[in-house]
Amino acid sequence: MSIYDKLSQLGIVLPPVSVPAAAYVPFVQTGNLVFLSGHIARQDGKPWVGQLGLTMTTDEAKPAARAVAIDLLGTLAAACLAAGKTLDDVKRIVKVLSLVNSTATYTEQHLVTNGCSELLGQVFGPVGAHARSAFGVAQLPMGACVEIELIAEIG
């Protein structure tokens, strides 16, 4: 089954690449690696605002990380297209780095980030298994609850 069929089966429509909010580009390819800039969680087109341990729970933020994964997939599809490829040419999701807006005492950043990691596994199967880091940070742009970046190999 193609990645696009899998996305359709999951009811996912990929968004267009977001316009950067500062001085950076959405992705950079070097060799077979594509580095995606951090994407913040959005809900209804606006930043999904919250701080874990203060205004949000882990269960409320996990869907935000899943939403980020969908946005990342839209950007990855654009990166593939720019290289003359498609998402079916993704050889591996290499690394996910997740920043979770959280209080100093909150310790479930890894569980929030599962919202992203689990979706990547559903979409790509074994190719979606990746190395990962999840950090708690004092604040994120526009008060977003989660920001995630991704590195993928395309072939």
Image: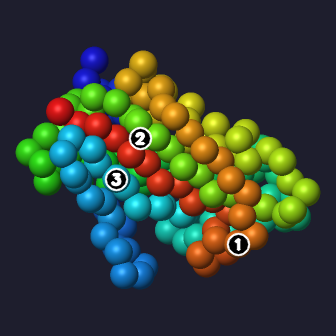
| Number of numbered labels in the structure image | 3
Q: Is residue 40 left or right of residue 83?
A: right
Residue position marked by numbered label 1 in the rendering: 139
The type of residue carrying mark 1 is: Gln
Q: Which mark is residue 12?
A: 2
Kindly give the residue lying farthest to the left in the view shown: 84
Q: Does the rendering let one see residue 143? A: yes
Q: Which percent across, then down, holds residue 138? A: 75, 70
**Mark 2 and mark 1: span between their CA atoms?**
29 Å
Q: Which percent across, then down, holds residue 155? A: 17, 33
At x 57%, y 60%, the residue is 147
Residue position marked by numbered label 3 in the rendering: 35
The type of residue carrying mark 3 is: Phe
Q: Is residue 4 left or right of residue 101?
A: left
Nearer-N-terminus badge (1/3): 3
At x 37%, y 81%, the residue is 23
Give the quadrant of residue 152: top left
Asked if the residue at tag 2 contacts the one at tag 3, i.e. Cβ–Cβ closer than 8 Å, the answer is no
> Which quadrant is the N terminus positioned in?
top left
Give the quadrant of residue 94: top left
Q: Give the SS element for disc 2.
A: loop
